Image: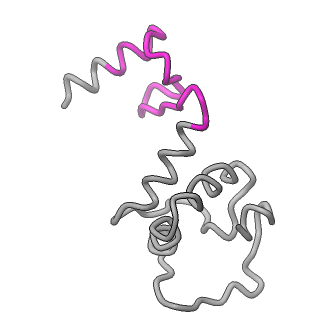
Amino acid sequence: AREALAEVRRRVACDSLPLLSLLQAEPLRLQSSHLSFQDYFAALALCEEGTQLSGAPPWQWSAWWANAVRLGSEMGEKFGRGLKRAAGTMGDKFDLNHKLGGDRPTALR
């Protein structure tokens, strides 16, 4: 695994991995060259058990998340359940009264 990571670092550094761009060398931060890939994999990760959000809850997301939410909603119920689980809001109901923020169309989707 370490050898594979070292190879990814080397290739990204010399711009020979066309689907990834280097954002930061240490700690390593990459970005998909085409953001639709990044949005798709973010939505897919939210469908998986154990994924946790490190930033704002979904009802406060900026427009930057709009495409990931759109792609996720097309994945069906597993995305909705995963999004709730990742936000730490399991249960049938939760109160969003006075909590909506960020980009309103994204937050309401």
Location of the C terminus by quadrant is bottom right
Q: For the point 34% across and 21% down, which residue is it?
A: 8
- Seen from the viewer's position, the closer of residues 77 and 57 is 77
- At 49% from the left and 71% from the top, the residue drawn is 77
Residue 4, picture quadrant: top left
- The structure residue drawn at horizontal position 42% and vertical position 31%, both measured from the top left corner, is 28
59 vs 16, left or right, is right
Q: Position of residue 83 (x, y in %)?
A: 51, 68
When the figure is inspected, residue 67 is found, relative to residue 7, above or below; the finding is below
Rendering quarter of residue 11: top left
Q: Which residues are magenta?
A: 8-36
The magenta stretch spans residue 16: yes
Residue 27 lies in what quarter of the image? top left
- Residue occupying the point 35% across, 14% down: 10
* 107, above or below 91, in the image: above
In the rendered image, residue 84, in percent from the top left (x then y), is placed at 51, 74
The image shows residue 3, relative to residue 88, as above or below, that is above
The verdict on residue 19 being magenta is yes
Q: Is residue 94 left or right of residue 108?
A: left
Colour scheme employed for the rendering of this structure: one colour
The image shows a total of numbered marks equal to 0
Residue 71: x and y in percent read 59, 52
> Image check: 78 left or right of 68?
left
- Taking 94 as reference, is 10 left or right? left
Quadrant in which the N terminus appears: top left
Q: Position of residue 86 (x, y in %)?
A: 46, 68
> Which residue ends up furthest to the right in the rendered image?
104
When the figure is inspected, residue 23 is found, relative to residue 49, above or below; the finding is above
